[in-house]
């Protein structure tokens, strides 16, 4: 009996260490106030250089902060000021040449560089937003979030994107220097060619954030530095972006409107009118 109790005690003491999630990356750049929610739970702890990242962790960069994560397969993800990202899962087996990563971006702007290209039938890294799902096989691309849309700027390689909701059909695969937008309840837009100046502006916004107030005019990417940015305020992004690279969000008149029939409270039946009392 004593032997069984001792063996059980050793097993229980060893279990927490074995149950801990393994680190899948580390911070290689931290500027400003960056915090981490372990397993997505409070309290948030300040991030330091070389701190590890595990599946389930949520990373937040404040308005004047930046961060870069290097994953175990040498993939890097840079977060602009004012971003929030969750590492849902990440697995890499160098011996078997297998990788499977899923990252959720809640708001802000991220730049992802996948350095190791693995020969797989399906995309082995997925990036999810509120409107889009992107699958990649070795590439460099930017994702910029708006309230009702996600802009995808593919610098090189191949990125395939579709709407986050399965009932919205249609997929677009971007080649080098191409752009698409995935809006709420809509398929991706037709790819549009980008210029070198577009990516220079993207690099700047990655550093200063989407509130950088970059100058410029025009409404579509691909027209160089002067036309890559819409005028300030053209894309309404409260608290996230005042000036955003990319084509404008479709006007509200072109978005599907959900028809809702108001539910009125039942009207009570009329009360019978009593005859007046006869005079006494």
Image: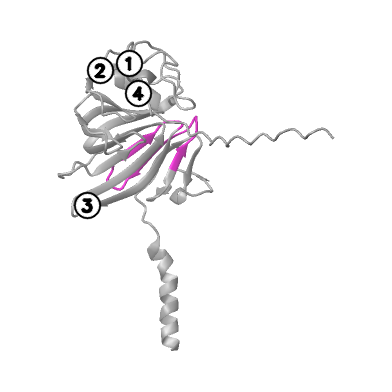
Q: Which mark is residue 255?
A: 4
Q: Which mark is residue 195?
A: 2
The secondary element bearing badge 2 is classed as: loop
Residue 124 showing in the rendered view: yes
Q: Residues within 10 Å of mark 2 (few under 14, many from 20)?
A: some
Q: Which mark is residue 228?
A: 1
Which numbered disc flags the more N-terminal residue, 4 or 3?
A: 3
Q: Is residue 15 above or below residue 99?
A: below
Magenta segment range? Answer: 59-82
Would you name the residue on which mark 3 appears?
A: 94
Residue 13 forms part of the magenta stretch: no
Mark 4–mark 3 Cα distance, whole angstroms, equals 45 Å
Tag nearer the camera, 1 or 2: 1
Label 2–label 4 contact, CB within 8 A: no
Label 1–label 2 contact, CB within 8 A: yes
- Tell me residue 7's x, y (percent): 41, 80
Which residue is depicted at the point 38% across and 37% down? 105
């Amino acid at each position: 009996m004593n032997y069984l109790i001792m063996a059980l005690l050793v097993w229980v003491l060893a279990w927490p260490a074995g149950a801990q999630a393994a680190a899948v990356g580390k911070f290689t750049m931290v500027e400003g106030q960056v915090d981490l929610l372990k397993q997505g739970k409070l309290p948030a702890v300040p991030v330091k250089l070389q701190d590890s990242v595990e599946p389930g962790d949520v990373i937040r960069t404040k308005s004047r902060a930046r961060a870069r994560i290097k994953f175990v397969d040498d993939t890097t993800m840079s977060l602009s000021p004012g971003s929030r990202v969750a590492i849902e899962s990440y697995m890499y087996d160098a011996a078997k040449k297998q990788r499977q990563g899923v990252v959720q971006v809640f708001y802000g702007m991220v730049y992802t560089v996948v350095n190791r290209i693995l020969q797989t039938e399906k995309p082995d890294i997925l990036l999810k937003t509120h409107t889009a799902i992107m699958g990649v096989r070795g590439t460099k691309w930017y994702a910029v979030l708006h309230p009702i849309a996600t802009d995808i700027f593919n610098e090189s390689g191949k990125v395939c994107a579709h709407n986050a909701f399965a009932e919205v059909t249609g997929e677009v695969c971007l080649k080098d220097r191409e752009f698409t937008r995935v809006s709420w309840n809509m398929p991706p837009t037709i790819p549009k060619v980008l210029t070198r100046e577009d990516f220079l502006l993207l690099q700047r916004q990655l550093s200063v954030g989407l509130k950088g107030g970059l100058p410029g005019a025009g409404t579509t990417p691909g027209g160089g530095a002067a036309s890559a940015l819409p005028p300030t305020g053209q894309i309404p992004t409260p608290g996230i972006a005042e000036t955003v690279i990319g084509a404008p969000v479709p006007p509200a008149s072109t978005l599907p409107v959900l028809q809702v029939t108001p539910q009125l409270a039942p009207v009570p039946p009329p009360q019978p009118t009593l005859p007046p009392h006869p005079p006494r």
